[in-house]
Amino acid sequence: MRFSFNWLKRHLSTDLNIRQIADRLTSIGLEVENLLDPGEIFRNFKLVQIEAMEKHPDADRLNICIVMDARGQKMRIVCGAKNAKVGLKTILAMPGAIIPSSREILKKSKIRGIESDGMMCSPAELSISSDKDGIVELKNEIDLETSVGDVLGYGGGIIDLSITPNRGDCLSVKGIARDLAVAGVGDFISSEAKPCKDSFKFPLDIECERSDSCSQYAPIIAFRVIRNLKNGSSPEWIKSFLQSASMNSVSAVVDMANWWMMDSGRPLHIYDLKKIKGRLAIRFAKHRERFTDLKNVEHNLHRDMLVAADAESPLCLLGIMGGAKVACDENTTDILIESAFFDPIFVSRTGTLLNLSSDSRTMFERGIDETSCVSGIEGASKLILDNCGGEASKIFVVGREPMPKQSITLRKEKLLSICGHDVDWESSRTILKKLGLREIESSKTEATYAVPRWRSDISIEEDLIEEILRITGYDNIPEKKMEDVFIEHDKILSEKKCLTEASRLLASCGLSEVISYSFIREDYANAFQENNKLIHLINPISADLNVMRPSLIPNLLLAAKRSLNYGQSGVKIFEIGNVFYNQYVQERHITGLRTGSAHDRSWLQKKRSVDPFDAKADAFALLDYLGIKLKNVVVETVAPSYYHPSRSGTLFLRKKKLGYFGELHPKINKLFGIAENLVCFELLVASLQDCNGEKNYYVSKVFPKIVRDFAFVFGAKVAIGNIMNAIYKLDPLISKVDIFDYFNLSDTQNSIGVSVTLEAVDRTLTEDEAKKVSAKILEYIGTVGGELRAK
Amino acid sequence: MTELDKLLASCLSEIEKCDNLKKMDSIRSVIFGKNGRITQIMDRLRGLDKEGKRKLGAEINVVKNEITRQLDLKHSRLELKELNKKLGSEFVDVSAPARHRSFGRIHPLTKVSEEIANILSSFGFVCADGPDLENEYYNFTALNMPDHHPARTMHDTFYVNVPSSEKGRNLLRTHTSPIQIHAMLANTPPHRFFSIGRVYRSDSDATHTPMFTQVEGLVVEKNVGFAHLKWIITNFLKKFFAVKDLSIRLRPSFFPFTEPSAEVDVSYGIKDGEMVFGCGDKWLEICGCGVVHPNVLRHGNVDADKYQGLAFGFGVERLTSLKYGISDLREYFESDDRWRNTFGFQHVS
């Protein structure tokens, strides 16, 4: 909502300046987004007239102009503009002026040896148009005393407000003035439109659909015809006000309807009467009926949209926008003014379906004064008759005004409770009355109010309390300490604590944290979908961000690729976030990626690429940290298809899947254009949550351990992890199983060195006990096709 | 000079002359070995009477002890000498670089989320969580934004191709507020929750990313009002920015889920070109808050006549940027190494 200070002053008599007004607006909830104070913007600018000109002695294209301001002061200006001529009135920037287009401060300077007292500005330099050829040419009748801001249509300054969606009443200059007056910054100048003289019967035949939904969507529509007017150009004051509101001037009639709308908050629509063929019908649109709006955009209408149509076609999409067919132009002499009340939801739905917005739509959506149909026509008629001549018909009304709203009761107790402190009851009531609420009855503890028709947002007690707080000022509410209470919650869903700890653990393993978008490119998502259905965004911001990610790996790969491309030798990163697939599934994953060399080049460490055991180590470090007994974790040598089929695995804890790890499939390297080895782990947070299981018992006395080393030979295919897991389970005395050696003896045989630690918590083990365990191990190894290796 | 004296003198001189440990061993056996010089003298004791044995024995012992002492002394000297020689040959250039051990960095948003969680926990708030994929009911309707409410159009919502249900179209949550509803429904009042999470809006420019992070707090208790909300926000900000004094300014605003609603500005000043909180006379918008609308409480199965709600919400990126001086919002999600090394946090920070 943009308007000039001068416009505001038509409705508000105040001594405050524009800055003070702006501060007050913000404090009552009408947030000032931008303030253009011409006194500030055009400090050190003034209007001048060129008195005399002569050629610059040292430059062909430059002139030396003598200019004079309103007080008769003469200045010498060096100027290169072709349109500079004696007698021209223009705008001069003096030293110290900030040039609007460049934000540079103008300094006094010599141009080719001649000192210039300032600079005459082009429209582009003043940021009023893109025209940079030549200086501003002002009309000769302009008084040099006029302020630069006024000449440029700043009207005492421009206030740009961001109006919250509840305050439909403040989508008009009048409404804003009314609110400011309540806040005590001046007096509201009330201007009720008096009925115009009507000189003839309403001439048009209007037929209105009679249905419940029609009378629900459009409870009242009022019409008037004005004949024999002259639709020339608007008076200057209207043009300048419209300019301050960033609206273009079209023609007198259209400008006045627009101005009236912005001034009073009452949307109107004006038809060129002579372009209406036959009678006017208010009806629902036909299925896929065509309508061309004022901006010449064509729409296919829906059955539940209301139109005003003549015998041929829809002329106006009611509540939103008029049609090109009945637009007024300079030849218009007879007009039909329509002023109605439309249901906000109806208007909003129509606008959303057609993706069409307009000031009228915004006003209806946010709520206008339902009772202003007739007074709105009267006010606009007067304006048009005064400026364009013509005579007005009687007003024709279809339907009737909606029933007044129910009254609202304010309880003092509720007021105090919401504020959390003491508020004065009497002054609270005064504020409500000033806001136009009519007090129906009141006592020391309660008061009941009728809400003014322009405040469609006030419907419950809390709304009244907000109004009181808003006007009293939130700053007057003291701070009050929250009581310390212990609230026991039945059920809280949160993994957050575990996740921050996981981040820190992974960082200490050398991986850096990444946070990336939850949506990715479709082809990347496809590579990780694993027969799951991907979730697509219906309205993505770009084709690269159109699918919800089924895995965190793709974004990690993109990040890794970027780092590799600028010369990083190895990348170690992780992300904790959700993945999405199959319509409703959203799982939180912890995913880490390592690529390139395992460590920076060093004279102490042999250079090597990352391998699946780097990823496995990361995953196991995290599992260990989260309290999962690693000896119970089982690795199965299967993994999703984006992993290398023989260098990856799935982690299980008692049949529950914890996640995956391994080298990625070369097709992924190809898709992402990464040559280096890629190893990954993915852990499913939900399964980590409920397995922070077994307790550790502290044993104070330590008894000696027995370590037994075995060298076994196996047929080629064994999963050593499974053998380790099985050995653990052979005897409770086994506390540790390590692999100290693992290599191929031949194509068919593997040699595996296993070190087994035996330990009891309550005694020193005997040689006998150790022998028994060894025997069990040997027996077990025999069952899985292994034997002790001959020396 | 007795024979023993001579023996002593000659042994000591041999010990004195010895210059390596090997020779020391042979000297020791020449003196104390089976046929060693001391052993030979000891042999003579056999032919003596008791008194003679006692006398000569004592004299031999003195000599023996002295030789042993000198032998040990020399031995340890030689040992030290040889050790020093060996150590000298074991030189490594310790000025050379050590093995690489690098740590990763924590994302600033994680660090700040943790800081926020710690502060709110100290106020008695408990963390609640909810899904990113929501539907119109939880994201809008339950939060007092019925169909065609103008506020719905203020949220540039991402919709997904999941078939609609009785809870409306499916979408990516545009704020963390739907978590309020889930958390209220899962528990009985009173409530003190907070939630931190990713939210999505179809908006992208220098100051907007299509995904960002919100933190939101909800109190539902019997005797809480605006004054308490002010206390929570002021004290939260004081702790977050680690300043003793800090003023906030509340401006009336509009959110469909709170009534009354306010936007909160925090005071700051500029010192040496940097923003400093807790002093100065400038204001910066930092948070939205309000008294929970009774319709929202009802959707959370709370008796709006008995309980009152307070709610507030911050943008986590904004808080992070302000506290740690990160200027471009988009860089949070661009996963750039250099950015991470500049703004990321140590794993134990």
Image (cartoon, rainbow, N blue to C red):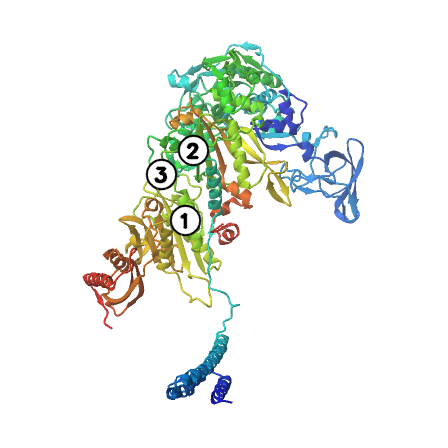
Q: Does A170 appear above or below A192?
A: below
Q: Amino acid at mark 2?
A: Phe
Q: Is residue A604 left or right of residue A74?
A: left
- Real-space CA distance between mark 1 and mark 3, rounded to the nearest whole angstrom: 33 Å
Where is mark 2, residue-wise? A486
> In front: mark 2 or mark 1?
2
Which residue is labeled 3 in the image? Answer: B161
Q: Chain of mark 1?
A: A
Q: Does dot 3 land on a helix, a strand or a loop?
A: loop
Residue B136 in sight in this render: no
Work out whether A636 lies above or below A161: below
| Residue at 42% over, 67% down | A606
Location of residue A147 with respect to A196 vertically, above or below: below
CB-based contact (under 8 Å), mark 2 and mark 1: no
Residue A166 point in image, percent of width and height: 50, 25
Q: Taking the image as drawn, is residue B232 in sight? A: yes
Q: Residues within 10 Å of mark 3 (few under 14, many from 20)?
A: some
Q: Residue at x 80, y 32 (%)?
A: A72
User: What residue would you read off at disc 1?
Assistant: A502
Question: Gap between marks 3 and 2, in whole Å?
Answer: 43 Å
Q: Are marks 2 and 1 on the same chain?
A: yes
Which element type, helix, strand or loop, lies under badge 2? loop
Q: Is residue A646 left or right of residue B252?
A: left
Q: Crowding near pointer 1: few (<14 within 10 Å), some, many (20+)? A: some
Q: Chain of mark 3?
A: B
Q: Nearer the viewer, mark 3 or mark 2?
A: 2
The subunit letter for the residue under badge 2 reads: A
Q: Amino acid at mark 3?
A: Asn
Q: Where is residue A773 shown, x and y percent of the image?
A: 23, 61
Kindly report which numbered mark, 1 or 3, lies closer to the viewer in this rendering.
1
Alpha carbon separation for disc pair 2 and 1: 28 Å
If you read the primary sequence from the N terminus, does the residue marked by circle 2 or circle 1 appear first? 2
